Image (cartoon, rainbow, N blue to C red):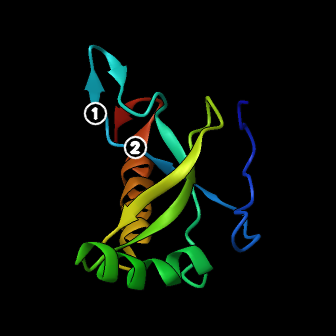
Amino acid sequence: MKNETNPTCPHCSRTMEEYQMPDLRYSEIPIWGSNFLWVCTNDECPLFVNGWKNMAEKHGQLASFRYMIQPDSGEAGVIPAFNANVFDVLMEERRRYRGSFDNGNLL
């Protein structure tokens, strides 16, 4: 099922944000099947909070995960998060990058 509007995270009920994916392709098809994912960026989301302990105990990794939905298929899952603000930083970089273009031309 295609998700065209911001869904809510089933773990914390917060509105998810659009995370623009890097242009990674396999045979000219975006790896994720879309140019963006819906991602829960709530640092207090139980999935994210409990993920740190889960990853440390089960996998020996200092990481957590965030809930995500692939917008074209509606497929849900998790995406790794190696620090609390990684998506904030990446989203802000993408916003600044987008802001430097006007109709596809670098300003």
Q: Position of residue 69 (x, y in %)?
A: 59, 47
The one of 47 and 38 positioned closer to us in this rendering: 47
Q: Which residue is mark 2?
A: 21
- Does 36 appear above or below 16? above
Helix, strand or loop at disc 1?
loop
For this orientation, the residue located farthest to the top is: 27
Lateral position of residue 103 relative to residue 58, left or right: right
The one of 70 and 58 positioned closer to us in this rendering: 58
- Does 31 appear above or below 28? below
- Does 63 appear above or below 17? below
Residue 24, numbered circle: 1
For this orientation, the residue located farthest to the front is: 58
Q: Residue at x 37, y 62 (%)?
A: 80
Circles 2 and 1: CB distance less than 8 Å? yes
Q: Position of residue 3 (x, y in %)?
A: 71, 38
Lateral position of residue 50 relative to residue 105, left or right: right
- Occupied quadrant, residue 62: bottom left
The one of 55 and 89 positioned closer to us in this rendering: 55
Which of the image's four quarters has the N terminus? Answer: top right
Helix, strand or loop at disc 2?
loop
Q: Amino acid at mark 2?
A: Met
The one of 33 and 102 positioned closer to us in this rendering: 33
* Alpha carbon separation for disc pair 2 and 1: 8 Å
Q: Position of residue 55 (x, y in %)?
A: 35, 75
Q: Amino acid at mark 1?
A: Leu
- Occupied quadrant, residue 93: bottom left
- Does 4 appear above or below 63? above
Q: Residue at x 59, y 85 (%)?
A: 44
Q: Residue at x 36, y 51 (%)?
A: 97
For this orientation, the residue located farthest to the left is: 60
Q: Residue at x 72, y 37 (%)?
A: 4
Mark 2: few, some, or many residues within 10 Å (few <14, many ≥20)? some
